[in-house]
Amino acid sequence: MHDKPPIQDTSVHEAPVRHGGLNGRTALVTGSSRGLGLLIAGELADRGCRVMITARDELALERGLRMLRGRPGEVAATACDLMDPEGPALLLAAVRDRFGADVDLLVNNAGVIQVGPVAAMQEQDFRRAHELMTMAPLRLVQALLPSMRARGSGSIVMITSIGGRVPVPHLLPYVTAKFALTGLSEGLGAELAQYGIRVTTVLPGLMRTGSHTSAEFTGQVGREYAWFATAASLPLVSTDAGRAARRIVRAVESGRRELVLTPLAKAGVLAHGIAPATTDRLLGLAARLLPPSGAAPEHGVPGHRAAARHPRGGPVHRLTVLGRRAGRNHNEPTAS
């Protein structure tokens, strides 16, 4: 990572702010150049927060920053590789330099989705997922804790997943990292409450963010993309990402310890808690319906390239209309 000055939004916002609970607070949202992170940043800015968005891709950050202009809160952006051990210190320094304040609210949202059978996955897939979705959030929290404890206040939001409670097939690197992040979040909530620091664990199900074009596909890539992109686009299976972002921010305002998003995710968490053996058998049956790795499995094909393997007007193209529309609205990459 390079120590670069934040990308600044120089516009001045004078719109009235009604949400006193978050008005004037300084927020840092990771993985916020696109998708759910971008939407959460927008909700926070609407409530009068000073928001720093961050991701690795500077061009995507610039586009995301333009999409957030005109909100009541001040917004800036800075590029950061969260897997760099020096990243947290440089990122928090950028927040102080831009806003003249320490972070009051941290939203750990950055992640990577790797889709495919475990037989086609590599050890590096698990290491990368763990580093980005477990260790990077931990390092950020550790860097923030001294200032939050000194103030006796602060909010931390961990965007985990239904995959952090229920082992969804063909997402094993993601599931492994999210299980760890869920445990980390719940443990932090128990330990940090005594210091006035609130931790909210968010477990979303599938959301229509358009993030299937940012996922990575392994194995029989065309078939893996077909089931995942379709599931992430259908209204009865996935939920609107804007609505999810609003619920997450309201959970922060009210100090909730846990938020499970989407009816299917709630049903999955409940079923796995009450009857884990039965749920695991059902998940095993679901895994049998998903594509095997194949004779010549591919590895790590980006979703926007996998999408191009399905013809316009074909079944997958028709079933993913809402997901593709969400992707265009939320700064996700489009099919090549």
Image (cartoon, rainbow, N blue to C red):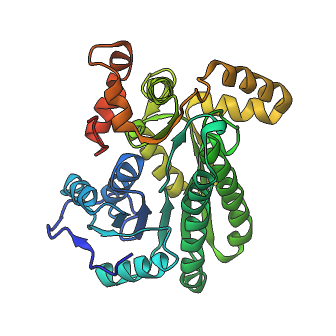
Q: Residue at x 31, y 29 (%)?
A: 308
Task: Please indicate whether residue 227 sits to the left or right of residue 98 in the image.
Answer: right
Task: Please indicate whether residue 74 sits to the left or right of residue 261 in the image.
Answer: left
The quadrant in which residue 30 appears is: bottom left
Q: Is residue 75 above or below residue 116?
A: below
Residue 292 percent across, percent down from the top left: 62, 25
Asked if residue 209 shows in the view, the reply is no
Residue 327 percent across, percent down from the top left: 32, 37
Closest to the observer, 8 or 151: 8
- Report the quarter where the C terminus lies: top left
Q: Residue at x 32, y 34 (%)?
A: 326
**Furthest-left residue in this view:** 11
Q: Residue at x 40, y 40 (%)?
A: 211
Residue 190 percent across, percent down from the top left: 74, 65
Closest to the observer, 233 or 256: 233
Q: Is residue 251 above or below residue 268?
A: below
